[in-house]
Amino acid sequence: MYLRLFSLFAILNLLCVACLQRDVSTAPTSSKTTDIPSECTKIGQTWVSPNDGVTLVCISAGKFTMGAAEDDPQAHENEKPQHDMYLDAYWIDSVEVTNVNFGKCLAAGACHPKQYETTADGYVPYSVHPDSQNYPALLYESDPAVEYCQRAGRRLPTEAEWEKAARGTDARLYPWGNIPLDCSLANYYTCDLFTSATSTVPSCGNSEHCKTKQVDSYAIGASPYGVDFIRNKENGHNFSGFGRCSTRML
């Protein structure tokens, strides 16, 4: 079960999803990294970060079911046993980090990806194409994801925080519930949604099969907390591009 959540939502999703509470002894002193949201107490609360303008949603404190059931035929052994996990409240980005926001981090000299195409001969790369600025940023490494979240005053997630934001507290198989996966709920490898001949958005990676959707394209497939997870795919695998950041009260 957990693998299903994980493989469907991300190859790179763990790069920047939910967050750990920042250690006060190492917390940056810049105003960019000290702004924090109000108390998160219930589903439906939102907060807009003053640092990058991203809307975060509240993941309220409490237990959720983590991992896969023993009789789940799609689960690997390292996803078991299924168990209850308690998490304190935290806030998480409602959508993935976009090309435009990651581009601002690049321009400020705060993000340093080793592999990130911004120029090319004969075409405009996905990351800087004017028609793909509200699309998820694609990274192949974790350090620049850490850098983005730190600049935004947030950080990376734990596995448990990410899974709770994705599946809620009722042990569902997908963010939207237990309804089988289809292209109205998610953008994955076999969908035809992203093969439109009229699309002006270039491929997002090293394959013509790497196609994404705008970060707010699948509200109907969002998790119980309002987190929109699945819209990207490459070479038969689904991923969430850059991922997302979050924060927790210190």
Image (tube, rainbow, N blue to C red):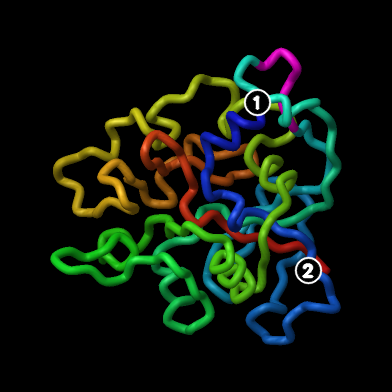
Q: Quadrant of the N terminus?
A: top right
Q: Secondary structure at mark 1?
A: loop
Name the spot of residue 164 as percent of width and height, x first: 71, 41
Q: Secondary structure at mark 2?
A: loop
Which residue in the protein does label 2 denote? 22
Q: Are marks 2 and 1 in contact (CB under 8 Å)?
A: no
Name the residue at 48% across, 44% down. Answer: 239
Q: Residues within 10 Å of mark 1 (few under 14, many from 20)?
A: many
Lateral position of residue 47 relative to residue 186, left or right: right
Name the residue at 58% across, 67% down. Answer: 143
The amino acid pointed to by label 2 is: Arg
Earlier in the chain: of badge 2 and badge 1, it is 1
Name the spot of residue 75 as percent of width and height, x first: 65, 23
Check the image and report above or below for 94 versus 248. Answer: above
Q: Specify the segment rendered in magenta.
A: 67-72
The amino acid pointed to by label 1 is: Met
Lateral position of residue 170 relative to residue 166, left or right: right
Residue 181 colored in magenta in the image:
no
Q: Residues within 10 Å of mark 2 (few under 14, many from 20)?
A: some
Q: Residue furthest front?
A: 114
Check the image and report above or below for 221 versus 199. Answer: above
Name the residue at 69% across, 53% down. Answer: 58
Lateral position of residue 17 relative to residue 36, left or right: left
Q: Residue furthest bottom?
A: 30
Name the spot of residue 165 as percent of width and height, x first: 66, 44
Quadrant position of residue 187: top left
Which residue in the protein does label 1 denote? 1
